[in-house]
């Protein structure tokens, strides 16, 4: 019964769940490989020194930033559709 209850919820929030993850993961992966500072470096450093709190904090901050970025883009899209009359 649970899949039938969650299916409409997941279908309507599908862009919110998957779009931010794809956009920022490539940037963070590049940062993990070559940078000396930043969020990707923080996550990588935390995993190297076995500091799980640092890793989880970095991933949570990345998720929050991704959600805020997607929310701003969504607002801009709504504004542009209203301006175009769509």
Image: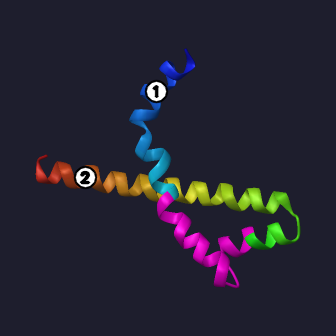
Identified at 44% across, 53% down, the residue is: 19
Above or below, 28 relative to 18: below
- Residue found 55% across the figure and 14% down from its top: 1
Residues at marks 2 and 1, CA–CA distance in whole angstroms: 29 Å
x then y, percent, for residue 52? 83, 58
In magenta segment, residue 28: yes
34 on left or right of 25: right
**Magenta residues, start to end:** 22-43
Q: Is residue 58 left or right of residue 29?
A: right
- Residue 15, given in percent of the width and then of the height, sits at 41, 46
Residue at image position (59%, 55%) is 63
| Other residues around mark 1 within 10 Å, as few (<14) / some (14–19) / many (≥20) | few
Q: Quadrant of residue 37?
A: bottom right
Asked if residue 47 is positioned above or below residue 36 in the image, the reply reads above
x then y, percent, for residue 16:
45, 46
Mark 2 lies on residue: 79
8 relative position to 28: left or right = left
**Predominant secondary structure, magenta span:** helix
Q: What residue does disc 1 label?
A: 7
Vertical order, 3 against 45 (above or below): above
Labels 2, 1: front one? 1
Residue 33: name its quadrant.
Answer: bottom right
Residue 24 marker: none
Return the residue found at the far left. Answer: 85
Q: Earlier in the sequence, mark 2 or mark 1?
A: 1
Percent coordinates x, y for residue 75 in the rendering: 34, 52
């Amino acid at each position: 019964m649970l899949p039938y209850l969650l299916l409409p919820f997941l279908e309507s929030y599908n862009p919110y769940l998957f779009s931010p993850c794809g956009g920022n993961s490539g940037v963070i992966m590049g940062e993990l490989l070559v940078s000396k500072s930043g969020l990707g470096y923080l996550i990588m450093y935390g995993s190297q020194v076995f500091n799980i709190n640092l890793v989880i904090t970095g991933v949570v901050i990345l998720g929050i930033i991704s959600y805020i970025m997607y929310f701003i883009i969504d607002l801009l899209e709504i504004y542009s559709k209203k301006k175009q009359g769509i």
